Image (tube, rainbow, N blue to C red):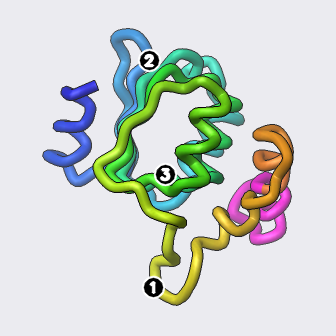
Amino acid sequence: MQKLIQLLHSQSLSCVIRQGDITREFTSRGILDLFTLLNTHPDFLKEALVADKVVGKAAAALMCVGEVREVYADVMSQPAHRLFEAEGIKHSYRELVPHIIRRDGKGQCPMELLTTDAPSVQEAVERIRIKLNETSRIK
């Protein structure tokens, strides 16, 4: 995991995922890369190691459904932490925060708000799918 964290920071990436001997690097902000990966190559997430800059509940739900093995985040929200605990996924963070803040600094991240009261990780992922479809961010 330490090598993934170093790669995350040295290359200014948003997320790094290692599955076996293959490492994929991501630069997009938000959850779209994770969502796309879950829907196009779900086997890549199974038992993977993930190092991410920011993990809120929405990202955590995607990782839980993808059955990742371990997660590190520079910043992790308390709802994400609780979800990983409940799902038995090993996780660590540099900073634990009450919730993820919007990029403009004005309130809570919309995806974290969207998934806050989701009763299951499957329901959270379904809410994300619907929202991304509504905003035409996915096809």
Q: Residue 28 in the image: x percent, y percent?
A: 44, 57
**Left or right, 23 with reference to 119:** left
Residue drawn 21% across the image and 28% down it: 2
Q: Which residue is mark 1?
A: 105
Residue 130 sits inside the magenta stretch: yes
Name the amino acid type tagged 1.
Gly
Residue drawn 82% across the image and 52% down it: 118
* Mark 2 secondary-structure assignment: strand
> Which mark, by number, is residue 118?
none
Q: CA distance from mark 3 to mark 2?
A: 19 Å
Q: CA distance from mark 1 to mark 3?
A: 16 Å
Name the amino acid type tagged 3.
Val
> Which mark, by number, is residue 19?
2
Residue drawn 53% across the image and 54% down it: 78
Residue drawn 22% across the image and 53% down it: 12
Q: Which residue is mark 3?
A: 55
Q: Are marks 1 and 3 in contact (CB under 8 Å)?
A: no
Quadrant containing the N terminus in the rendered view: top left
Q: Are marks 1 and 2 in contact (CB under 8 Å)?
A: no
- Residue closest to the eye, 131 or 49: 49
Magenta stretch: give its range.
Answer: 128-139
Quarter of the figure with residue 135 = bottom right
Q: Residues within 10 Å of mark 3 (few under 14, many from 20)?
A: many
Q: Residues within 10 Å of mark 1 (few under 14, many from 20)?
A: few
Residue 109 sits inside the magenta stretch: no
- Mark found first going from the N terminus, 1 or 3: 3
Q: Residue 107 in the image: x percent, y percent?
A: 56, 84
Residue lying furthest top in this view? 20
